[in-house]
Image (cartoon, rainbow, N blue to C red):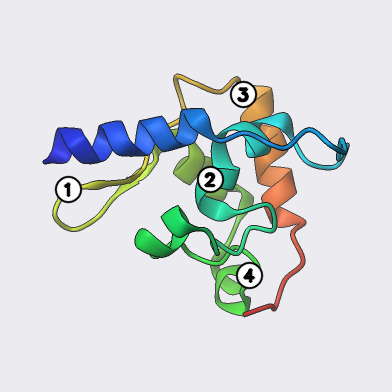
Amino acid sequence: MKTLSYLTALLIAFTATTNGKKKDDNTPKAWKRQCVACHGKDGKGNTPTGKALSIRNLTSKEFSEIKTRESIKTQIRNGSSDENGLIRMIAYKDILKEEEVDALVEFIINLPQGEE
């Protein structure tokens, strides 16, 4: 079961694509490639996968009160599991370059905040 959860998360992360109609220079390619499937373009987690995994709204007031650059970077690098050990977010430390992680951190820090 744990392996299936990991494989599902990995598959979702690697199959996330953008429509390519308009390039958004403010959005890191890694966000479009790795994060959109779960977190959505706007960071609210309002996607089928985001809803299934109860993804945190990265624009919420609650998140804005607890986020730090370091905590976001740690989450991206190490991923997370639930209390049963099921992977909720894969670790990107061996997938993304450090500059990609840094770009994601800045993107997340600068998402519009206070939205529910």
Image quarter for residue 65? bottom right
> Crowdedness of circle 3 by 10 Å Cα count: few (<14), some, many (20+)?
some
Q: Quadrant of the C terminus?
A: bottom right
| Lower position in the chain sequence, tag 2 or tag 1 | 2
Quarter holding the N terminus is: top left
Label 3 secondary element: helix
Q: CA distance from mark 3 to mark 2?
A: 21 Å
Q: Is residue 7 left or right of residue 11?
A: left
Q: Nearer the viewer, mark 4 or mark 2?
A: 2
Which residue position holds label 1? 85
**Residue 2, position as x, y percentages in the image:** 15, 39
Q: Position of residue 100 (x, y in %)?
A: 66, 27
Give the labeled residue for mark 3: 98
Residue occupying the point 87% across, 35% down: 23
Residue 64, numbered label: 4
Residue that badge 2 annotates:
37
Residue 71 can be seen in this image: no
Q: Secondary structure at mark 2?
A: helix
Q: Secondary structure at mark 1?
A: loop
Marks 3 and 4, Cα distance to the nearest angstrom? 23 Å
User: Earlier along the polypeptide chain: callout 3 or callout 1?
Assistant: 1
